[in-house]
Amino acid sequence: METDAFPQPWPFGAFEQYLGEPGFLVATEDGVCGYVVGDTVKKPGGRVGHVKNLAVHPEQRGRGIGTSLLDRAMAILRGQGVGPIKLEVRRGNEGARELYRSQGFEHRATVNGYYDDGEDALLLVHYENE
């Protein structure tokens, strides 16, 4: 599913390091139909949540699976004491950008050439009180 969802997929080893972590959630319906990987990072001033990866099988999109995964991951991260939650999204990924916008994420910065193919990433942030 990772290779179907992203032009620059994570390698299998990247997933292995998050197995068993509270922020690694999998949605299933007749097999895996989506997943999210969330983590926390200690920064000066507190803990920050980071949604590292979110994917929904292309045939399952538009059914609320991504929203449910994101909501649950954010709740888990908040339960771990994070303040803001950040993520990076490809500038050209309109579907994902709309999902994040609908959940209250705001554009805070653009990272030029973030992805290996040179595409920019938008840094989006969600604050606890929003």
Image (cartoon, rainbow, N blue to C red):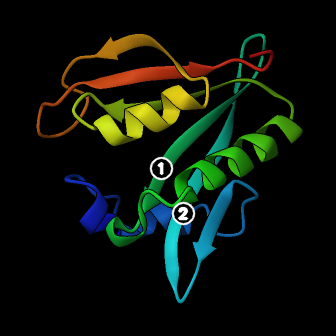
In the picture as drawn, the residue positioned furthest to the front comes out as 63
Give left or right: position of 56 versus 85.
Answer: left
The quarter of the picture where residue 94 lies is top left
In the rendered view of the protein, which quadrant contains the C terminus? Answer: top right
* Residue at the spot of label 2: 35
Question: Residue 4 at what x, y percent from top left?
Answer: 25, 67
Residue 21 vertical placement versus 53 (above, below): below
Q: Residue at x 35, y 58 (%)?
A: 10
Residue 68 vertical placement versus 126 (above, below): below
Amino acid at the residue labelled 1: Asn
Out of 113 and 105, give the one closest to the viewer. Answer: 105
Asked if labels 2 and 1 touch by Cβ distance under 8 angstroms, the answer is yes
Question: Residue 48 at what x, y percent from top left?
Answer: 69, 26
In the picture as drawn, the residue positioned furthest to the bottom comes out as 30
Question: Residue 92 at what x, y percent from top left?
Answer: 21, 33
Out of 66 and 9, give the one closest to the viewer. Answer: 66
Residue 104 vertical placement versus 11 (above, below): above
Q: Is disc 1 placed on a helix, strand or loop?
A: strand
* Residue at the spot of label 1: 53
Give left or right: position of 70 versus 21.
Answer: left
Q: Residue at x 79, y 43 (%)?
A: 75
Q: Is disc 2 placed on a helix, strand or loop?
A: strand
